[in-house]
Amino acid sequence: FLLMDSRVFEGEEVVRVCVRVRRLLPRELKSGKSIHWNVESNRIWSPEDPRQKVYAFDSVLDSSARNGDVFESLCQHIVSSTFLGFNGTIFAYGQTSSGKTHTMMGDEDEPGIIPAAVDAIFDLIEATPSREFLLRVSYFEIYNENVVDLISESMEGRKRSLQLKEDTMGNIIVDGATELTVTEPNEIMHWLCYGEQHRHVGATNMNERSSRSHTIFRLIIESTAKQDPKAEDEELSDGAITVSHLNLVDLAGSERVSQAGTGGKSLREGGNINKSLLVLSQVISKLSEGSREFVPFRDSKLTRILKSSLGGNARTAIICTVTPAEREQTKSTLEFAFRAKNIVQHAQVNEVLDDKTYMRRLKKEMATLRQELEAERNGDRAVQEERWKSALSEKDREMQEMERERENLQTAIEVKEKQLQGLTERLLSGEAGPSHIKQNRRETWAPAPSKKANRRMSFFPRLLSNNNQEVSLEGNDTSTSVEEESPVFE
């Protein structure tokens, strides 16, 4: 990995798309299924199509490709950019039983995109000793249009329906989702496997272990430059903190009732899955056309959560998995992918700046401008000098404005402190019940020397066991759910 300067990533960028064609399954071979699609040089087409339409993407991988090939061809760029403060999203899309979960999760012999991303993140941390990092994880699913926490340690927490809220910047927040601080790959993989144990799955005619929900595994990466304790000048570093989100999404597969053979509870699940995927397809269509018409993000929980990942403040990669034995459904997936690759993103570096940090940065910029102005005075460049003077004047104005805001804020704080003091005195003079204050813990850490070989994911399938019952990522477990939990939504 090369941690490139953020300027490399500045500007607009389209969604990156990879199409992965899996091999025929034994049941497909047994039933006489044949291959309807050809792959060559990042292109895919069906020789049976009268129009001979050829689909071209950033990457098209045939059945010989492994999960590592998918990561290197599409996802490495997304993971690297999160270390520069850009949000990133990688999600798998395709019909049921096309290989989405295998691509995202993998197994012990062939780790998927999520384990590979975790490994890459710690490689980058070890390669960046000049910064301190804080990593947190959350994991939730969208089941029957309810958002459910998968890593809450209480059954009640895993049954509660989480609410979606929008902050002042237009970002969607999953209110109440558990966020856990982690310091090593094994911790992340533990919580990933813990969440998988509580994900809703079920058996259909198409897949013995079919995902019945969409899942989003989120890594929150905070970093700041290390402060030199020996340095006397506090302005050597401006103290800015970058905060980025890496969303790793495994979508449930679209399915036809006639093929899936579902009924009752599974039929309802399939209906909600298809509905949310239809809204996703409509959103993709609107965005790919550059339409200024209303985009129906709010029509499903999935598109609300992915709003910033689609045409917003993020770098996004989509892995479309298809089966060569299906013509119409594979064609539908390819059309989705073809539209998605035209969506333009507008990613920005996400920084947290307090007043002191912002003032420090302005001072640095002003010092640089003064140096450049002094250098220009020796030449006959009156226009250039005027431009520098104007820039310096603007910076002075910004600093004065910041100072006024700081004074106003200090005044407001003093007023609130007096109000709090008065309220405290009134409470002490009367009868006040006990109060419980929950303090949030933050753990900032920096990379320490470690042997990469010691953090391999060899324990991956072992952690997926619950009550001595192993969850298979290959689809050999016919159990409909590892834990009999029926969410009670508020």
Image (spheres, helix red, strand yellow):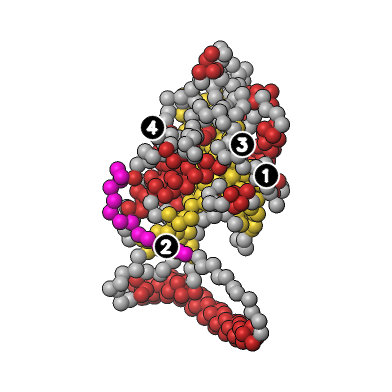
Question: Does the magenta portion include 429?
Answer: no
Q: Amino acid at mark 3?
A: Arg
The Cα–Cα distance between marks 3 and 4, rounded to whole angstroms, is 25 Å
Rendered view: 37 above or below 177: above
Q: Which residue has dot 4 on it?
A: 109
Disc 2 crowd rating (10 Å Cα; few below 14, some 14-19, many 20+) is: few
* Point 48% across, 62% down: residue: 351
The Cα–Cα distance between marks 2 and 1, rounded to whole angstroms, is 34 Å
| Dots 3, 4 in contact, CB < 8 A | no
The Cα–Cα distance between marks 2 and 4, rounded to whole angstroms, is 33 Å
Give SS at disc 1.
loop
Mark 2 / mark 1, whichever is N-terminal: 1
Q: Amino acid at mark 2?
A: Glu
Mark 2 / mark 3, whichever is N-terminal: 3
Q: Is residue 288 left or right of residue 314?
A: right
The foreground one among 137 and 372 is 137
The quadrant where residue 419 appears: bottom right
Mark 3 / mark 4, whichever is N-terminal: 4
Residue 247 place in picture, x, y as percent: 52, 47
Q: Which residue has dot 3 on it?
A: 212
Q: Which residue has dot 2 on it?
A: 443
Q: Which residue has dot 1 on it?
A: 145
